[in-house]
Amino acid sequence: MNILVFGPNGSGKGTQGAIVQKKYGMPHIESGAIFRQNIQGDTDLGKQAKEYIDRGDLVPDDITIPMILNRLQEDDCKQGWILDGFPRNKVQAESLDKALKDAGMNLDYVIEIVLPRDVAKLRITGRRLCVNDNNHPNHIAFDAIKPVEKDGKMVCRVCGGDLKTRPDDQDDEAIDKRHDIYYDDKTGTMAAVNFFKQLGGGVKVISVDGRPSIGEVTDAIMKELG
Ligand code: AMP
C-alpha cells in the first residue's frame, strides 16, 4: 500500500503517519526528518539544507526531489510506503507522479488532514522531538501525548529519551512562511494536494478534519484505510 500524507505543519500529520506505519509496517518517509538527520550528522546534504529550513523556506527542488525519489527505490519500499512532507509544491507533485508511473508504482491513498491556519499555528510551538525516534510524538499541550517527568525534567513519553524543539518551530516568521507555502493553492502544497486529488486512476482520497483528538483523527483515517 502506497500512501501520501498531507497536512499543514501542526496538523499532526507526522503523528498520524507514525500510527499508520505501526499498523501496516511500511516505512514512514518524512522529508523533513531526513533533512534533520542530515543536519544532525553534519553531512553535505544537511549543510545545504539547514539555512532554508531555519528560515521556513523549501529546500530547493533539485536537492529534495532526487533525495525522495531515490529513497522510494530502496528495498524496504517494495512492500509499500507512507510519504510525509513530500510533495510540497506542484513541481514536486508532477515529478513524483512521473517517477511513480515510470517505476510502475501505484499510489493507493492520499490522506489530507484539514486544519485551519490559526489552529495549526497554535499547535506548533508546543511540540517536542524525541532524540531517539522521530516517530515518538510528544506535545506539551495534549494530554494523550504529553512528555513525562523523569529526574526533574520532561522526557519522551514513549522511550524516556531526551526531548528537543525544532528551531523552525520557535520562530514566528518561519512558521508563517511554512504556512504560506502550505496553503498556497497556485504553486504550493495545496496545489500538490489538488493535483493528486484530481488525478483519478484508482487513488482514494481520505480527507479528515484535523481538529478532534489524535485518537479520533486516527479512527477517521483507519475507517477509510480498512
Ligand atoms: P517538516 O518536518 O515536514 O515540517 O519539514 C521541515 C522543513 O524541511 C521544511 O520547512 C522545509 O524547509 C524542509 N522540507 C521538508 N520537506 C520538503 C520538501 N518536500 N521540499 C522542500 N523542502 C522540504
Image (cartoon, grey):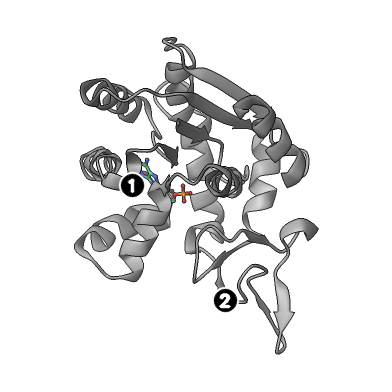
Is disc 1's CB within 8 Å of ligand 1?
no
Identify the residue under disc 2.
Answer: 161
Q: Quadrant of the N terminus?
A: top left
Q: Position of residue 138 (x, y in %)?
A: 65, 62
Disc 2/disc 1 C-alpha distance (Å): 26 Å
Using the image, determine if residue 177 lies above or below residue 200.
below
The numbered mark, 2 or 1, whose residue comes first in the sequence reads: 1
Q: Is residue 59 visible?
A: no
Residue type at numbered disc 1: Asp
Identify the residue under disc 1.
Answer: 76
Q: Quadrant of residue 137?
A: bottom right
Residue type at numbered disc 2: Gly
Density class for disc 1 (Cα within 10 Å; few <14, some 14-19, many ≥20) is: few
Left or right relative to 115: residue 142:
right
Seen at 36% across and 55% down, the residue is 34
The answer to which of 172 and 7 lies nearer the viewer is: 7
Q: Position of residue 117 (x, y in %)?
A: 64, 37
Q: Position of residue 69 (x, y in %)?
A: 26, 38
